[in-house]
Image (cartoon, helix red, strand yellow):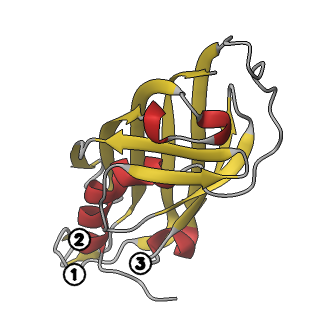
Amino acid sequence: MKRAPAHSYLAAAAVIAAAALAAAACGSSAPAPAASAGTGTSRTGTQALAGSLAGPAALASSATIPLRLTGLVNTTASVHLSSAQRSPVTITTARGKLTVRHTQGSGSQKLLSTKTCKFAFGQHSTYTVLPGKSTGAFAGATGSGTAVITITGTLPKRNGRCDTSSTAQPSTAGLRVSFAAHGPLTVR
């Protein structure tokens, strides 16, 4: 498995956290209760997406996080982490296409322990559903929310200190990449 340097992996995570939401609904769909067709009624609720990836797969230069979607649409999906950022993004599902516009977001990183060299990186962004570009069960859907990607792990030591250089490779033991998004969604 090809591993990216820690610094470039964390930098890429900062760019792709918002894009990860855009890819979130790719995958298989389980049927969800449908809104009444043609009656003009709508349903509103919270839609949540969450998942994580651990170990060597979390450090791959092209990691894919499996997700569980709960709320108005219950299904599974995956987020493919990539440094390519585009917005808006169309998400193709078994129930239609969902198009979202997302922000680049803001990130933070911390060395949590100088003894164990545990680190955490977080990226927070927002998204908005584009109703005129969504189809199927998502045609006319509206909503917005927040997305967060978190990377936690342990950096190696060099000369008795935590190696925070751009070439440091985090240990795959205990390494975890997590994705979570939620917000209100209205489907017609």
Location of mark 2 (residue):
7
Which mark is first along the chain, 1 or 3? 3
Residue drawn at 47 percent across, 31 percent down: 131
Q: Can you say whether 35 is above or below 136 in the image? A: above
SS of the residue at dot 1?
A: loop
Write down the quadrant of residue 139 in the picture.
top right
Residue drawn at 74 percent across, 13 percent down: 39
Location of mark 1 (residue):
167
The residue lying furthest to the bottom in this view is 1
User: What is the CA distance from the residue labelled 1 to the residue labelled 2?
Assistant: 7 Å
Which mark is first along the chain, 2 or 3? 2
Q: Tell me whether circle 1 and circle 2 mark residues in contact (CB < 8 Å).
A: yes
Residue drawn at 16 percent across, 73 percent down: 165
Foreground label between 3 and 2: 3
Q: Position of residue 69 (x, y in %)?
A: 66, 39
Q: Can you say whether 185 is above or below 119 in the image? A: above
Q: Position of residue 89 (x, y in %)?
A: 41, 52
Instruction: Characterize the local packing of mark 3: few (<14), some (14-19) or many (20 or more) Cα atoms within 10 angstroms.
Output: some
Question: Does residue 147 appear left or right of residue 35 in this picture?
Answer: left
Q: Can you say whether 141 is above or below 22 in the image? A: above
SS of the residue at dot 2?
A: helix
Q: Callout 1, which amino acid?
A: Thr
SS of the residue at dot 3?
A: loop
User: What is the CA distance from the residue labelled 3 to the residue labelled 1?
Assistant: 14 Å
Q: Callout 3, which amino acid?
A: Ser
Q: Position of residue 19 (x, y in %)?
A: 37, 53
Instruction: Characterize the local packing of mark 1: few (<14), some (14-19) or many (20 or more) Cα atoms within 10 angstroms.
Output: few
